[in-house]
Every structure is written in C-alpha cells, then in structure tokens.
Image (cartoon, rainbow, N blue to C red):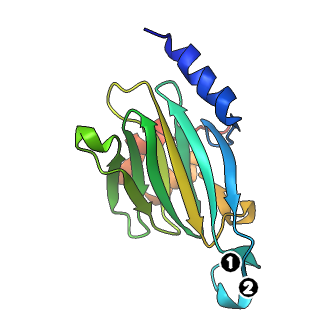
Amino acid sequence: MKDKRDEVGAIIQRLRLEPHPEGGWFRQTYVSSDTLSSAALPRHPGERPCSTSIYFLTTSENFSAFHRIRSDEMWYHHSGDAVSIEIIYRDGERDTLVIGPVELGYEPQALVPAGTWFASHVSDNGRWALVGCSVAPGFDYSDYELADQYRLIKDFPIHADIITSLTRAKS
C-alpha cells in the first residue's frame, strides 16, 4: 500500500496544486470569459466572471479554516475520502454537509450558500479528499473573508468548539 504522503504528493504534483491560504492545496481550473456587471450584482463591489472553479485537496492533517464569500459555492467530490463541510448560517444555526464517494452512500455534491461561514475537513478516519468547488458569480479575493477566531466565537459562542478546531488563532 502506498504511503499517504506519496499518494497526496503525487496528486499535488499531477494537478499542479499550490498551498491555499485557508489550508489544503488548490488550483483554479476555470474562469468564465463571460462577466456580470456590478449593476447586476448588488452584493459584489464590481464586475465578476459568471463562474469560476477550482480543485481543492485536503488531508487528515489539515483543514480548510472558517471563511465566507459573497457568492454561492457548489462543492463536488472527485476522489478519496468523504469531506465534512461545517456551516454557520447568518442566523446562528449550524449544519454539517458531508460529500463523498457515491458508491459508499454519500451525496457527491453540496451547496454552501453565499455569506455563510464555512470550513471543511476530511471526515471521520479519512486520509485525504479531492473536491472541486464552483463559485457563481465567480470568485474574487475581494469577496473573501478568513474568520478571526475570537470574533467568530464572540458572534456565535454556542459553536465555540467547532470554531476553535477549524480556525487558526492570530498571534
């Protein structure tokens, strides 16, 4: 059996992935050549491509830290183990969406609504997972906010445990 590091390293190399600011590795694979004007996008401060897409790889040793964006984000499971997507909605409700291999009974895709705080990690005793994420209107870093652990706990104290486990405290 291959060592997990070798397997993950081969995927990173094969797909030309780079470290992601919130954890894991990614590569943008698509940016629509069609754009939407800022007048058509009241939540966005400017023109955006209609859609963008990335590969995203995570392992049991890392996670995608809580963050939010101004657009809907659809997640698609491609390979590996199941992924849990932890969501905190604007009203404070929390949900866990799990995507994974359909042949093992998982849903293969899930939607993270615009403006919600979310983080992800490999589920249970999984080793690694490769997913795709499509954003519409398309992703722009000006629409992205990485959570401040202390502020998010202050806003949602009932979820302090999951927030602490899936954010990085600022030093």
The vertical placement of 36 against 109, above or below, is below
Q: Which residue is at 65% across, 41% downward?
A: 26
Of residues 88 and 148, which is closer to you in this image? 88
Q: Give the quarter of the image for residue 56.
A: top right
Q: Amino acid at mark 2?
A: Ser
Q: Which residue is at 33% across, 47% downward?
A: 98
Of residues 109 and 59, which is closer to you in this image? 109
Q: Amino acid at mark 1?
A: His
Query: Mark 1 = which residue?
Result: 44
Of residues 94 and 39, which is closer to you in this image? 39
Q: Which residue is at 65% across, 58% downward?
A: 145
Relative image position of residue 36 (x, y in whole percent): 70, 82
- Cα distance in 3D space between marks 2 and 1: 7 Å
Of residues 148 and 59, which is closer to you in this image? 59
Relative image position of residue 158 (x, y in whole percent): 35, 52
Relative image position of residue 43 (x, y in whole percent): 63, 80
Instruction: Tell me if 151 is positioned left or right of 90 in this view.
Output: right
Relative image position of residue 85 (x, y in whole percent): 41, 48
Q: Does the residue at mark 2 contact the one at mark 1 (Cβ under 8 Å)?
A: yes
First along the sequence among labels 2 and 1: 2
Query: Mark 2 = which residue?
Result: 38
**Disc on res. 83:** none
**Number of numbered labels in the structure image:** 2
Q: Residues within 10 Å of mark 1 (few under 14, many from 20)?
A: some
- Farthest bottom residue? 39
Q: Which residue is at 75% across, 71% downward?
A: 33
Image quadrant containing the N terminus: top left
Q: Secondary structure at mark 2?
A: helix
Q: Residues within 10 Å of mark 2 (few under 14, many from 20)?
A: few
Q: Secondary structure at mark 1?
A: loop
Image quadrant containing the C terminus: top right
Q: Give the quarter of the image for residue 109.
A: bottom left
